[in-house]
Image (cartoon, rainbow, N blue to C red):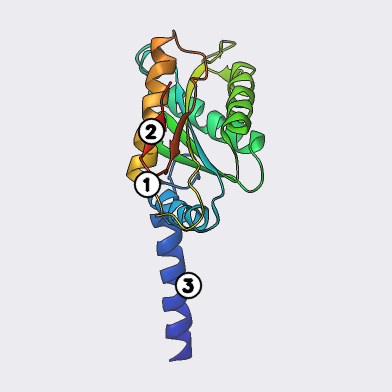
Amino acid sequence: MSTVLRRTRHNNRAATHYATRDALTGLGNRRALAAQAGQWASWSARYGGAMSFVLVDVDRFREINDVWGHGVGDRVLVALAKAITATVRSADLVTRLGNDEFIVLAPELEPDGAQVLADHLLATIRALRVPAEGDAYLTLTASAGIATVFDPPDSQPRALDDMLAAADRSLASARQAGRDTVAEPVVLIDTAEEEERRP
């Protein structure tokens, strides 16, 4: 009986691991992000600490798939996952949000610090050389949007969807500016009247 229980616990842990991991990159997925973001949003709301999201999107990723095929596209995504993970702080959480979008949850990082981190991420991505076919290598650029929650102590925790929507608005500004750039952060501040600084 104890063997069956041990096997069941092991299987449950494995199922939880796979349910929160992106199969291609090994990064956390949206479920993992939701769990971590919920905890940090509660901390941020209770103590008034900043929390930033950096949303990174590969420029013209569809063209890579169209020209080189999905195998090379997958290689690009794996290379990006490794490069982003190696660039962020140890306390940051990197997840693959969808197709070619990655998000960094950066606790206790204010807007200026998030901008520095995003600039560093894009520089790292520009330096990548991803093998394509034969002797060919791909170089990449990406665009980044930032959302920072900066609420006072004892405020209400922010919903993940609201924070992601703010990061997406910032990312849209980066795309409109011509890509390969970091947009101004969207800063969410809970005051007597809700104030939002947009790019």
Name the amino acid type tagged 1.
Leu
Amino acid type indicated by mark 2? Ala
- Res. 166 mark: 2
**Mark 2 element type:** helix
Does residue 177 lie above or below 150 as drawn? above
The x, y position of residue 71, in whole percent, is 42, 26
The earlier-in-sequence mark between 2 and 1 is 1
| Cα gap from disc 2 to disc 3, whole angstroms | 39 Å
Residue tagged by mark 1? 160
Q: Residue at x 55, y 56 (%)?
A: 47
Q: Which residue is mark 3?
A: 10
| Secondary structure at numbered mark 3 | helix
Badge 3 amino acid: His
Residue 40 point in image, percent of width and height: 50, 54
- The C terminus - image quarter: top left
> In this orientation, which residue lies closer to the viewer: 13 or 120?
120
